[in-house]
Amino acid sequence: MYVNKSSFLELNRRKFLGAAASALALPVTGSLPALGSDTSLAIGMANSVMTVTYPYITTSLAHGFFEEEGVNVDVVMGQNSSQILSLLAGGTVDLVFCNPEPVIQLAADKNVPVKSVFVVLVAQYILTVPEGSPIQTVKDLKGKRIGMASPVSGIDYLKARLMDEGMSVDDIEIVPTGFGGQTIEAVKQGQVDAIMYWSDALALFRYSGLELRNLPKADWEQGLYQYVAATRQDVIDTKPEALKRALRAMARSQMLSVVSPKATIDAFWKQYPDQAPKAGEEEAAFGQALARVRQQNTVIGIESNPSRETIMSHQWGKQELSSWDRMQENLLRVGSLKNKVDPATLFDDQFSAYANDFDREQIYELAAAAE
């Protein structure tokens, strides 16, 4: 099954390259009271283009969840986790969505008081090979070419997986394969033997017809995080109301994404009409978006095909000390972290109870209205 490839490749070219190379992010949503207000929050995204896989932002905006919770947000787009975290550290934004590894590195090696307050994705990078490849395990990658978005995209994870098998990056060749059509062609033409990407990227590749097989995961990966919401200690101290209200809006949107992927897609196109499909392309665009949302829902910390009972009791965004401990230990063992800190200082779960205290029946009503 194929999508309109010109639209697919252009969208994801922009997603990967970014709207600009500037070190300053650009605001993309409405007016904002003075940042000193406890009911205002500047939120930074580690990506230059908003996508359907960020329902905690897009759905919250489209359905007015932030306003209902009494918090006024302004969203700025960045380029990557390191860049958006620099804006957080410098005080330009109050809350950012990013990978957890640079959060640990900032806190431990740079002594910057940043910490996670909400988990979005419970997953790590994924190593895949073409369906007919003889490669069966990570050990079989020795001497092979591995395609990655960039030489540093997920490098800590790759180092750890190779180290599990007594190897290092010197035993493989890293090939920058970008994103979208460039990646697909690299695999089809045999320019790489395997690729390593995040879950949503692989969903897009597969939807475009690329047949891929995941290599077995390591036991230590279970329960580790891929994407979190991080803030500074002074924001936790001075804006607790804004944080907890924003996180509850996001938890509501995460639940709606699971209950009704269609509602999530509709909300995204409503909020960002420039990314809505053109006439005649609706079916293909909806199919692609649906594949992405469904895939994303498999890595947000809730079981696949959850029952209503499970959804009604699930704790969105909740964090575990053991996960942060293991992530830090992993960075230490691959040499990407110099100092070790108490893992309890890397996150703050105090807002979890409030974030999950909302009317879940209302979410089912919204889902029913969207179908």
Image: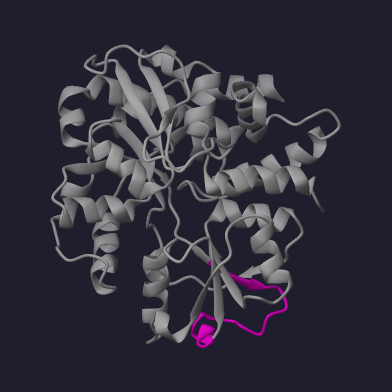
Front-most of residues 44 and 206: 44
Residue 165 in view in this figure:
yes
Residue shown at the point (54%, 26%) measured from the top left? 59
- Residue displayed at 33% across by 51% down: 100
* Residue 356 is at least partly visible in this image: no
Left or right: where 321 falls relative to 300: left
Judging depth in this view, the residue of 172 and 291 nearest the camera is 172
List the single residue furthest toward the right: 280
In the rendered image, residue 247, in percent from the top left (x then y), is placed at 36, 29
Split into 4 quadrants, where in the image is the C terminus? Answer: top right
Q: Point out residue 31 in the picture as x, y percentages from the top left corner.
A: 41, 13
Q: In the image, is residue 30 part of the stretch drawn in magenta? A: no
Q: State the colouring used for the structure image.
A: one colour
Please provide percent x and percent y for residue 276: 70, 29
Say which quarter of the image contains residue 271: top right
Location of residue 169 with respect to 278 vertically, above or below: below
Could you tell me how many numbered marks the image carries? 0
* Residue 48 in the image: above or below residue 272: below
In the picture shown, does residue 366 fall above or below 109? above
260 displayed left or right of 300: right
Q: Which residues are magenta?
A: 127-143
- Going 61% across and 42% down the picture, which residue do you hit? 293
- Is residue 128 highlighted in magenta? yes
In this rendered view, identify the residue nearer to me: 68 or 22: 22
The image quadrant that residue 286 belongs to is top right
Q: Position of residue 362 (x, y in %)?
A: 53, 19
Quarter-of-image position of residue 284: top right
